[in-house]
């Protein structure tokens, strides 16, 4: 969570906290740029998690967050209130991340080449005591990100909006303009593929 | 969310996954729970879904530094800053848009008054090259959804209302019988692709 609110004094921050997203957006549309800090405070973290999972690189993820916020707030007319601002923003951010990934290529921050086979055991990843198995968090992330890369764009986007942004099925459906049944189906098959990828790396 | 089917038969894999995610409510949730009670071996499948979710959460990215967050927010503020110019661009923009629109209308309307009579239709193909192709609208604005755009193009994209043309029919040259010589610059024999025919332009109905 960003520490502190840049550019806001205490009174602005306190009053903006009490406003709904709709009220903040209305003030923003009328030229009040100070509400941007509150919107950023509310949604930068899930936006970053989504972007990072899609791009695998901190700097690129922050660029995607920046791009997503700018696009969303520049095109507020396109936000017709059919979903919450959060779900709409996260869709814009995830699309920005996918575009950025196509332009720049996905840059992983950790290579798996040097890892011992024992560390790549899929079974150890799927039990509650992963930490006790000695698999570092970064190693786990790199392996799961590799698994994520095997999904199609829409499966990946659906899964990340649910698993990383914390959207429930209905919110994911709104964000992606699909039915809840499609969300269920995509999530199920995304998980199947992830598990298959991880299972292939299990020590037999 | 409601999944109202009574689960006398096995829940679908998607429903089991939704149950594992805590997304089922009411009767649907109860039905899956009842079925799981009767089929305890299926609890493993539910646990596998949950363990993948746990592993996913534990692999979440480290937080950027406070300075990285501040930098990002500053950049957003800067990009959303309204542009200021020494003179009033708004009215200049309106004037330029008006002049451009007038020029476009004049360019489109003038040929109708300066064109040769509608009865003049070529009887023989001529050797000169076909007229240079001009872009023409084939859809209306409401039929277009811009999914994504390169930010560099955001200043250049122009979306306008289509021209009010008469009823358009799409035909190939095989569908046309040449009656009289019209525009000598038209060469028909190489036009295997469909072309737009505006009947009024050729005196048609």
Image (spheres, helix red, strand yellow):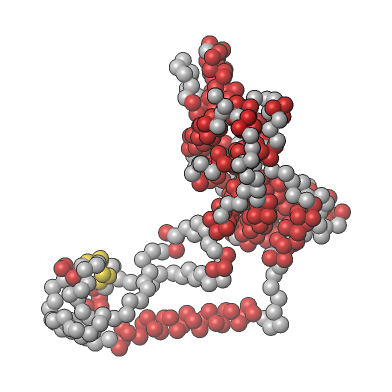
Residue B161 x/y as whole percent: 44, 69
In the picture, measured across the screen, residue B183 lies left or right of residue A6, that is: left
Quarter of the image with the C terminus of chain B is bottom left
Q: Is residue B182 visible?
A: yes
Instruction: Confirm whether residue A31 shows in the render.
Output: no
Q: What residue is at 30 percent from the left and 88 percent from the top?
A: B114
Residue displayed at 78% across by 51% down: B65
Q: Is residue B184 above or below residue B135?
A: below
The x and y percentages for residue B64 are 74, 49
Residue A39: give x, y in percent of width and height: 72, 52
Looking at the image, is B67 positioned above or below residue B45?
below
Location of residue A185 in the rendering, given as x and y in whole percent from the top left corner: 48, 34
Q: Residue at x 63, y 30 (%)?
A: A118
- Give left or right: position of A41 versus A76: right
Q: Nearer the viewer, residue A127 or B54?
A: A127
Tag count: 0
Where on the picture, by quarter, is residue B49? top right
- Please identify the quadrant where the N terminus of chain B is shown: top right
């Amino acid at each position: 969570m960003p520490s502190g609110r840049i550019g806001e004094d205490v009174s602005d921050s306190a009053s903006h906290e009490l406003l709904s997203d709709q009220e903040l957006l209305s003030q923003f549309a009328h030229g009040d740029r100070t509400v941007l800090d509150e919107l950023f405070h509310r949604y930068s973290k899930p936006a970053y998690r989504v972007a990072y999972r899609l791009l695998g690189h901190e700097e690129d993820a922050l660029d995607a967050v920046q791009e997503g916020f700018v696009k969303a707030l520049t095109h507020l007319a396109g936000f017709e209130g059919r979903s919450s601002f959060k779900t709409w923003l996260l869709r814009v951010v995830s699309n920005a991340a996918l575009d950025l990934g196509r332009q720049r290529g996905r840059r992983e921050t950790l290579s798996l080449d040097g890892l011992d086979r024992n560390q790549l055991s899929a079974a150890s990843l799927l039990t509650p005591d992963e930490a006790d198995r000695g698999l570092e968090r970064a190693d786990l992330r790199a392996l799961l990100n590799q698994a994520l890369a095997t999904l199609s764009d829409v499966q990946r986007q659906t899964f990340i909006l649910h698993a990383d942004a914390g959207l429930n099925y209905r919110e994911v459906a709104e964000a992606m303009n699909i039915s809840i049944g499609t969300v269920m189906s995509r999530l199920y098959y995304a998980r199947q593929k992830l598990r298959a990828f991880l299972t292939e790396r299990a020590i037999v | 969310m409601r999944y109202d089917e009574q689960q006398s038969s096995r829940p679908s894999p998607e429903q089991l996954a939704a149950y594992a995610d805590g997304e089922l409510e009411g009767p649907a949730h109860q039905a899956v729970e009842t079925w799981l009670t009767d089929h305890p071996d299926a609890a493993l499948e539910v646990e596998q879904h949950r363990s993948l979710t746990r592993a996913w959460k534990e692999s979440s990215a480290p937080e950027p530094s406070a300075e990285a967050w501040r930098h990002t927010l500053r950049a957003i503020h800067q990009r959303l800053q309204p542009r200021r110019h020494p003179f009033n661009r708004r009215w200049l923009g309106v004037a330029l848009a008006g002049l451009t629109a007038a020029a476009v209308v004049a360019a489109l309307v003038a040929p109708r008054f300066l064109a040769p009579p509608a009865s003049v239709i070529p009887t023989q193909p001529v050797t000169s090259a076909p007229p240079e192709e001009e872009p023409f609208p084939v859809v209306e604005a409401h039929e277009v959804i811009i999914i994504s755009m390169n930010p560099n193009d955001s200043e250049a994209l122009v979306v306008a209302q289509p021209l009010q043309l008469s009823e358009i029919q799409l035909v190939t040259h095989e569908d046309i019988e040449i009656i009289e010589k019209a525009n000598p610059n038209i060469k028909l024999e190489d036009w295997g692709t469909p072309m737009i025919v505006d009947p009024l332009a050729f005196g048609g109905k």
